[in-house]
Amino acid sequence: MRMATALLDSVDRFTRLAGHNRAAMLLFRLDGGPRFAINVFKVREVLRCPPLARLPTMHELIAGAFDYRGRTIPVIDLVRAMNYPPLAAPAEAHLIVSEFSRSVQAFLVRDVERIVHCDGAALEAPGHGLGYGARVSAVTRIDGALVAVIDVEQILAEVNGTQAEVSPRLRDAAQRAGARGRVLVADDSAVARRQLVEVLKQMEIECVVAHDGREALAMLREQAALPPAERIALVISDIEMPALDGYALTRAIREDAALAPLKVVLHSSLSGGFNEAMVRNVGADRFIAKFQPDLLAASVLELLQRAGAAAH
């Protein structure tokens, strides 16, 4: 079963959702129970699972590897990652080939259902009582049934590790420039928030943290009455977030006279040229693909300097 053509044909339609707090999700199952979802923009293709080659030195969540269009890519076992029993008929399993965070990998699932549109306001952070843990970023209801959105970035970080080291050159540049201005970080992923805070800490830049776009917008509106020196000057926001996504957050900032001067960086694992159009549509200052510490640090330094110059 191949869905690449259908997914590509849908990109223009999904792009028009930018700034309207809508999401497009691919639904799938890990067993005969609840459905799960992944953002359509992270999906390249859906395939029947081919024979996989596995080495004993591979991470425990790697089911193996296979040749995908001339390159060898790893297959992450989502069934195991979510603590489900092994598939009874692995030959009938499917792979969701995914591209994000500047890497290509596949996820092993039982079967794939369809693409659905979700209202961003209906996406909620999962309560602790649901037992999903850090590997689920949001939950919603589709056709009256609970659907969990997998935090594939978290799982990939567990497999590959994380790195948030800023080069000495940029750390020195930040100290020489004396970058001023507080930064708000908005991201629903705990691993992403830690990375961002670590980058800003190395640059000696003060930051505050929000867990989704709605919380971020409330914080921004609250601090707008503070003296100029105490206000937030720059927002670094994820795109995929429950309650209010990064596109809708940016649009809300631009439509609020008190917040419109803020510099906004959209920082996402989503790849592809469609991001450039979306950034223009909602009025963000920049898009940066996760996770590139030096590129992020250089952009933060430049935008804070521009914000400071505009304030004078």
Image: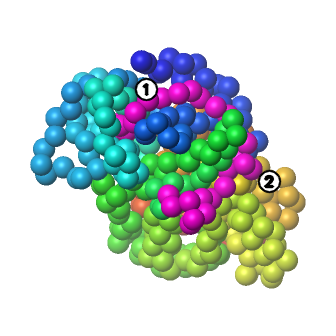
Measuring from the top left, give residue 68's x and y in whole percent. 28, 27
Measuring from the top left, give residue 299's x and y in whole percent. 53, 59
Tell me if 188 is positioned left or right of 98 in this view: right
Residue 89's image quarter? top left
Check disc 1 and report its element: helix, strand or loop.
Answer: strand
Instruction: Reply above or below: 114 against 293.
Output: above
Q: Amino acid at mark 2?
A: Ala
Q: How many marks?
A: 2
Q: Which mark is residue 217?
A: none
Tell me, yes or no, if residue 307 can be seen here. no
Question: Which one is in front, 115 or 176?
Answer: 115
Check disc 2 and report its element: helix, strand or loop.
Answer: helix
Residue density around tag 2, few if under 14, some if 14–19, many if 20 or more, within 10 Å: many
Q: From this viewpoint, which residue is outermost toward the right?
A: 257
Tell me, yes or no, if residue 79 can be seen here. yes
Tell me if 229 is positioned left or right of 37 in this view: right
Q: Residue at x 78, y 75 (%)?
A: 223
User: For residue 156: magenta?
Assistant: no
Question: Which one is in front, 88 or 196?
Answer: 88
Quadrant (top left/top right/bottom left/bottom right) for the N terminus: top left
User: For residue 110: magenta?
Assistant: yes
Q: Which residues are magenta?
A: 104-132
Residue carrying label 1: 45
Tell me if 108 is positioned left or right of 184 in this view: left
Residue density around tag 1, few if under 14, some if 14–19, many if 20 or more, within 10 Å: many
Q: Which mark is residue 252?
A: 2
